[in-house]
Image (cartoon, grey):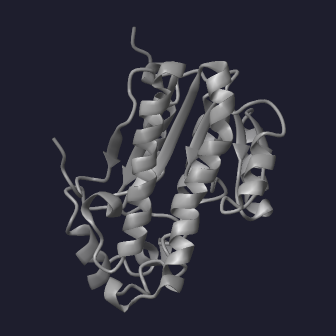
Amino acid sequence: MLSAEIDLSGRRVVITGGGQGVGRGLALAFGAAGAEVLVNDLRAERSRAVVDEISARGGAAVSVPFDVTDYGSVTEALTASEPVDILINNAGNAGAEGFAGRGRFAETEPADWESFLRVNLYGVLHCTRAVLPGMVFNEWGRILTIVSDAGRTGDPGGAVYGASKAGAAGLTRSVALENGRFGITANNISLGTMRTPLTEPLWAEQADSPQAKAILANYAIRRPGVPDDLTYLAVMLASDHGSWITGQTICVNGGYSLTL
């Protein structure tokens, strides 16, 4: 039986980096599907704003601000109450300057790598480790990690960012293999260039610029992605409909790269 409606009532989902952009879109979608949404963000005011949006639409949500790079804070926040059924590892760092400030790996230093590795890799390690014991105990769980095509195809000028995303994707595959017998699935969604608050100036103010045109020329569908492009897929993977899909990296990228 097929249904466009997915009911996640009774499930608790934590969405890291849920205060804006893709994370906000995911939080709203999971709230609409009936899940209790734990909205994480480094900045409490952003997570509270999304909680208010979900509540205004009749959903259930709570703000859980913590720093994904701090393992103590992560474990305290995610083990303080009922177990988490669904983890969405969305928090990420693409660089404080967005598309600017890129350079060849040979010109970087270890100090330049730290912020990417701490958020994109260690943040995923921390959150996944914190929720897994509860999922194993309950013999049900869903882990979904938002990665990037930079980790699949390489990223000239963003080698460490790509490496951190590839590492997170590799972790997901191992977690899938180790925990499938407990009714736990783990998958990645690999994104292309997204229209988010970080990249908004590129599209809103420079849509006809050579830089924007050069980026979109690599896409079969010549526009940046938006949160709605992946939210239904994420909700489906987190539901019982996704119970036999695990260890996969599913691309949502407008045809940036094609896979068999």
In which quadrant of the rendered image does the N terminus lie?
A: top left
Instruction: Please give left or right for residue 257 compared with residue 104 in the image.
Output: left
Instruction: Please give left or right for residue 238 compared with residue 12 in the image.
Output: left
Whole-percent x, y for residue 167 in the image: 42, 57
Whole-percent x, y for residue 257 in the image: 21, 55
Q: Residue furthest front?
A: 178
Task: Look at the picture and state if 49 lies above or below 103.
Answer: above
- Residue drawn 76% across the image and 39% down it: 61
In which quadrant of the rendered image does the C terminus lie?
A: top left
Q: Residue furthest top?
A: 1
- Residue drawn 36% across the image and 87% down it: 103
* Nearer-the-camera pick, 224 or 152: 152
Q: Residue furthest left?
A: 260
Task: Look at the picture and state if 143 lies above or below 243.
Answer: below
Instruction: Please give left or right for residue 104 compared with residue 243 in the image.
Output: left
Q: Residue 213: which quarter of the image?
A: bottom left
- Residue drawn 30% across the image and 71% down it: 155
Whole-percent x, y for residue 62 in the image: 79, 43
- Residue drawn 37% across the image and 66% down it: 162
**One can see residue 113 in this view:** yes
* Nearer-the-camera pick, 166 or 229: 166
Task: Please count the marks in the image.
Answer: 0
**One can see residue 31 in this view:** no
* Nearer-the-camera pick, 111 or 212: 111
Task: Look at the picture and state if 5 lies above or below 203.
Answer: above
Q: Residue 230: which quarter of the image?
A: top left
